[in-house]
Image: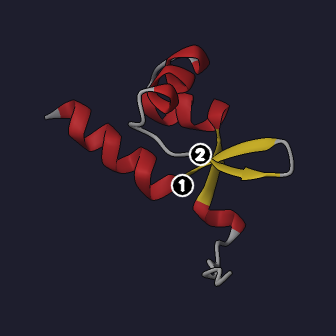
Amino acid sequence: MDMEQLSIRTDDLVTCEGAAKLLGVSRPTVYNLIERHQLHPVVISKNRYLLVTEVEALKAQLKS
């Protein structure tokens, strides 16, 4: 089975709590956005992180 490698720096990631602050919403709202596939978590061990670029893109989309 071929697997692609992806290189992500820790600066590229934000916690769900951090994403909530960036978006100006609650943490449960961030989890709802994940469930609706508007945000895509990166799972490391048992922790979920979000790509900062994806959160910022969603923020820009919500403003327009």
| Mark toward the start of the polypeptide (2 vs 1) | 2
Q: Is residue 55 above or below residue 34?
A: below
Name which residue lies at 45% across and 24% down.
24
Which SS class for mark 2?
loop
Instruction: Name the residue at the right extreme.
Output: 45
Q: Is residue 13 left or right of residue 20?
A: right
Which SS class for mark 1?
strand
Q: Position of residue 9 (x, y in %)?
A: 67, 72
Instruction: Name the residue at the front extreme.
Output: 1
For mark 2, what is the residue? 41
| Separation (CA) of disc 2 from disc 1 | 8 Å
Q: Position of residue 40 (x, y in %)?
A: 51, 45
Q: Is residue 13 above or below residue 29?
A: below
Quarter of the figure that contains the N terminus: bottom right
Q: Position of residue 53 (x, y in %)?
A: 43, 57
Q: Nearer the viewer, residue 34 or 57?
A: 34
Q: How many marks?
A: 2
